[in-house]
Amino acid sequence: MQDKTILEVKHLSKKFGETDVLKDIDGTVKSGEVICVIGPSGAGKSTFLRCLNLLEKPTSGEVNFEGTDLTNVDDKQLVKLRERMGMVFQSFNLFPNMTVIENLKLAPIRVKGMADAEAEKTGMHLLGLVGLQEKAHVYPSSLSGGQQQRVAIARALAMNPEVMLFDEPTSALDPEMVGEVLEVMQKLANEGMTMVVVTHEMGFAKEVADEVWFMADGYILEKGKPEDVFDHPQNERAKDFIGKIIQSV
Amino acid sequence: MKKRVKAIIQVIMVIGIFLTLGIWQTTQADAADNSLQRIKQRGELIMVTSPDYPPYEFQVNKNGKSRIVGMDIDVAKKVAKDLHVKLVIKSMNFDSLLVAIQTGKADMAIGGINPTTTRRQSVDFSKIYYSGGQSFLINSSDVNKYKSVKNLRGATIGAQTGTLQYGLAKKKIPNSTVKGMDKSTDLVLALKTHKIDALGIEKPSAEAYVKNDPSLKMIPSGYHLDKNEVGAAIAFKKGSDSLVNAVNKSIDQIKQQHLTDQYLASAGKYMKVNTVNTSMWHYWSYFAKGVEYTILISIVATFFGVLIGVILALMRFSKQKWIRGLAISYTEFIRGTPLMVQVMFVYFGIGVVVNIPALISGMIAVSLNSGAYVAEIIRGGINSVAAGQTEAAESLGLSKRDMMRFVILPQAFKNIWPALGNEFISLIKESSIVSIIGVTDLIYQLNIVRADTYRGVMPIFVAMLLYFIMTFALTRLLNHYEGKMKHAG
Ligand SMILES: Nc1ncnc2c1ncn2[C@@H]1O[C@H](COP(=O)(O)OP(=O)(O)OP(=O)(O)O)[C@@H](O)[C@H]1O
Ligand SMILES: [Mg+2]
C-alpha cells in the first residue's frame, strides 16, 4: 500500500511568456508520503504546486495522477480528477458569502451529489477534527486567520481527497496562530494522508516530512530525507539557503 | 482585438440599417388598397393625436376621468360614425404623428395638421376640414412694442417643433431666431417668462389661450399663404385611397353644415370648465396614474435589465470569441446611442414587423438599455472578486456554472449593490423618455395637467416632488438591504 504512486511528474516545465519558471522537474509522490518543498522566494514553488492540479497549465512535461496524465485530458475529466486533490492556500480563500458549514458542504453536494444531511454530518465531523465545531454557523469574516485556515483544511478534506496540496499555509498567519494549523496538518499526516507542502516551517518539515525537496531557479536541486537535506546538504545553493534559515531561527 | 471588435460593431450596424430599410420598403410597397375594408372588418378606427393643442385637441378631467376632447375629436367622431365603426384614440407627440401613420400604428392622424407639399410626400391627406389661419401670441405688456407682425423683425419666436408655424417663422420673419419646443404648453410658459418674444400658433389655439389668460394677446400673422398652409386636414398612410374617399364624404358634410363652428363652441365650453379648478389636488388622479406607470415601467425594466445584464456579463466570460464579440457589440451599441432613439426605434422601427403597444415598447426599450449598463456593472463586480476565490472553487472541482452561481456572482452582487442601486434610481428618472411615444407615465401626465390648467410651473414642481419621493424611497430601501448584506458577509 505504501508503494502506490499517487503523483508522478516528468520533465515538467512552465513558462510565463519569456520567463522560464519551471525548467525540468521530476518527482514522485507515493501514497501516505509527506513531501515538503522548500526554497527561496521566486524559486517556482507555488507554480509547481499549482501545476500538480492544473490550476496552472504546464508548458511541457507530464503530471500523472494515479496513472492519468492530467496534461492530456479534457476539461470535464480534469474537473473530475481535480476534486480528488485538495488544495489549501496561503490566503485561505474561504467563500465569504457562506457560513463555515456551507463552505464545507458546497462541493460535496454540488460535485459529488451528496445529500444535504450527509454533507452536514461529514462537515461537522471534519470541523470537530480541526476543533471548530462551535463555529459552524458563523461567517468566515468573524474568524481569526488560524481558524480560517483550519476551516479551509476541513473544506478540502470534505471532498475526501487522495492527496492534499498546501501552499505556505501558515505564512499569512500571526505567529501565535501558526501552531494550531501545523498541529492539524501533523494530525493529518499521522492518519496517513498523502501531502505536498510548500513551507518555510523547517521544524515541521524536519519532524513530519518523509522527503524534503529543495527548489531554486526552477529546478529541484536536492531531494532526500529531512535529516540528510538539513544536516548534510550536497548542493551549494541548498547549503546556503539552509544555512541562512538555521541562522535566523 | 480592438480592430476586430470595431469591425463587428460596424457589420451589425449596417445589417440593422438594411434590415429596417428593407422592412420599410416592403411595407410601403404593399400595393392593394384595403384600408377601408380593414377598418370595417375590425370595427374600429384608430386615430392618433397630440392632445396639447386646445381647442383642436386637449385633455379634460371630468368627474375624475380623463378624456381627450376638442374640435378634431368631434371631426373624428363624425367620421367614425359615418363609417359605422368605433373610434379609438391614441396620443403621442406631434412630431411622431406622421411616423405613427407611416408605420401603421394608427389609421389616421388628426391634430390641426397642415397638408403642406412636403408632408404630402410622405402621407396622404383628406380634404381640408377647417381653415384657422396663422397668428402670434405675445405678452400683453408688449402690445405697444409688437403692434403688428412687422415689429417682430429680429425677435425671438417660438413654435412647436415639426409644425408649419416653425417653418413659416423661419422663412417669413426677417432676422428672427426661431426656438422650437415639443409642447405648446412649454412654449406659452417660455413666452410668459420672456424667453421668447412671440409664439407662432394657429388662430383658434391663440384665441383659446387669450380667453383663458389675460396676460396674453394675439396678433394676426399677416402671412400670405395658400390654403394648404392655413387649413387642417387628416393624414393617412400613402395608398389609402378608399379610406380617404370615405372620410372626404364626412368632411363635405361637415363643411356644408358648418359643423366646425359647433365643435369649436363645445370645445370652448370644456376649456371654461377646465379653468375653474386648477389646483393640483384636483388633478391628483393624473399624477397618481403617472406615478403608477413610471413605477411599473421601472420595476419591469429593472427585472429584465438585470436578467439581460447577467446574461451579457456571462457572455463576456465565454470561451467562444463570437459570443464575447456579440456581447461587447451589444453593450457598446446601446451605450453609444440615446435612450430616446432606442425607444422610438422599438416602437416605430420594430413596430413595422410586429405591432407592439406603446407601453410594452417602452418597457422593452428601457429594459434593453438598462441591460447594457447592468452588464458593465456586473462585469466590474465579477472582476472585483478576488482571484483566490476562483482558484479555491476550481481546486474543489466545482464546475464553471456552479462556481459562478454559488461563489462569484453572490460576491459580485454584494460589491456592486451600490452601483446597481444607482442604476435603478436613474432608471426611474430616465424612463420618463417613454412619454414621447404616448406612454402615460409621470412626464406625460405632467404635460397633460399643464395643457389642461394653463399653469406652466406648478405641475412641474409637483412632478419633481413625486420623482424625488420615488427615488428617495428607493435609496432608503437599497441602503437598508446594503446594511443587511454587510451583516451577512
Ligand atoms: N501568472 C504569472 N505570470 C507571470 N509570472 C509569474 C506568474 N506567476 C508566477 N510568476 C513568476 O514566476 C516566478 C516563480 O513564482 P512562484 O510564485 O512560483 O514562486 P515561489 O517559489 O512560490 O515564491 P514565494 O516563496 O515568494 O511564494 C516568479 O518570478 C514570479 O514572478
Ligand atoms: Mg509561493
Image: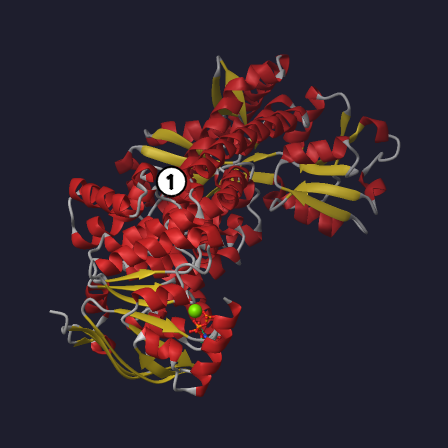
Report the amino acid beneath label 1: Pro
Left or right of B230 on screen, residue B128:
left
* Residue at screen point 65% across, 32% down: B185
* Residue at screen point 38% across, 44% down: A97
* Residue at screen point 49% across, 34% down: B483
The image position of residue B98, as x and y in percent, is 49, 46
Left or right of B264 on screen, residue B316:
left
Work out whether residue B123 can be spotted: no
Q: Which residue is mark 1?
A: B357
Q: Quadrant of the N terminus of chain A?
A: bottom left
The image position of residue B34, as x and y in percent, is 30, 47
Rendered image quadrant of residue A208: bottom left
**In the rendered image of this protein, does residue A11 appear above or below residue B89?**
below
The image position of residue B282, as x and y in percent, is 57, 15
Left or right of B227 on screen, residue A42:
left
Q: Quadrant of ligand 1?
A: bottom left
Q: Residues within 10 Å of mark 1 (few under 14, many from 20)?
A: some
Tally the numbered discs: 1
Q: Secondary structure at mark 1?
A: loop
The image position of residue B470, as x and y in percent, is 53, 29
Q: Chain of mark 1?
A: B
Front residue of B213/B463: it is B463
User: Extreme right residue here?
Assistant: B144
Front residue of A171/B197: it is A171
